[in-house]
Each structure stands twice: as structure tokens, then as C-alpha cells.
Image (spheres, rainbow, N blue to C red):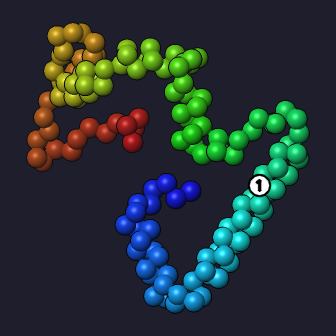
Amino acid sequence: MFSDIGVFELVALVILGVLVFGPDKLPKVIQDISRFVRKVRAFSDSAKEDIRNELGPEFKDFEFEDLNPRTFVRKNLLDDGDDLGLKEIRSGFDLKEEAASVTDAVNGRSRSSGSAPSLRKQDPVRPDERPPFDPDAT
């Protein structure tokens, strides 16, 4: 629970506790806090167990941590099994090449690889002329 608290932070918390509550009341406050934390943990564990019992036997291996989207994606999509073939998709997709081909297609240039479709370059519009209207583009 307190794995990310270092020695200096712990010493600072003790000094702050002594200053705020005083050396006489500090042990009582620590006992009250630890009792409260135990009650919250017991309540949380009983609530989780009640939910598991209500879901039925098919959810006996259900973990509440799996509801976190990051954990779900890491567990189901990024595992070593790779049932969906995501590694093949990632290896076959070159983002820089795709971006370059789209940029060239927009600018009317043709790629030497031939992967990008060439677009017909239109004549520039004069300042006193309206650009052509394309209902599909709007």
C-alpha cells in the first residue's frame, strides 16, 4: 500500500503528525486510522464477494481490476497469444509511408512505389472566380 513512500516522506509525516496532534495523542490517532483502514478493507472485500456471488459460478474468476480499460487491453489484446493477428497488422503498416503517399496524393504528385493513387491536378482558381462546388465533399 505504501510502496511508493520513501524514508524522507515517512519521517516528514511523523514530524507533521507530532506537530499537529502532539506526542500524547499521536498513538491514539494512529490506532484510530489503522482501525478505520481495516474496516474499509473488510467492507470492500465483502462487497466484492457479494458481487461475485450474485454474478454466479461462471464469473468465479472475475477480477475487478479487469474493469480498468488499460488492464483489459493489456490482458486481452496485447498478450503473447495474439489471437487477433495484431502483430501482423502492425508489421505490415508503415505509418510514414502511408502519410507520405497521402501527402503526395493531395499535392498531385505521383509516388515512385505506385502505392498511392494519383489525383488529377486541377487548374488554380483565379482570384475573381469561385472554386468548383463538390456536394459530396461537404
Relative to 64, does residue 121 appear above or below in the rendering? above
Residue 102 visible here: no
Frontmost residue, 74 versus 103: 74
- Tell me what residue is drawn at x 12 percent, y 48 percent: 128
- Tell me what residue is drawn at x 81 percent, y 36 percent: 59
Residue 24 visible here: yes
Please rate how many residues cluster around mark 1, counting C-alpha atoms within 10 Å: few if below 14, some from 14 to 19, many from 20. Answer: few
Write down the quadrant of residue 39 in the picture.
bottom right
Q: Secondary structure at mark 1?
A: helix
Frontmost residue, 105 versus 129: 105
Left or right position of 111 against 78: left
Total marks shown come to 1
- Tell me what residue is drawn at x 18 percent, y 16 percent: 110
The furthest residue to the top: 113
The residue under label 1 is 45
- Tell me what residue is drawn at x 26 percent, y 37 percent: 132
- Percent from the top left, x then y, of residue 10? 44, 68
Q: In which quadrant will I find the N terminus?
A: bottom right
The furthest residue to the front: 24
Amino acid type at image mark 1: Asp
Left or right position of 127 against 79: left
Write down the quadrant of residue 11 in the picture.
bottom left
Write down the quadrant of residue 100 in the picture.
top left
Frontmost residue, 99 versus 90: 90
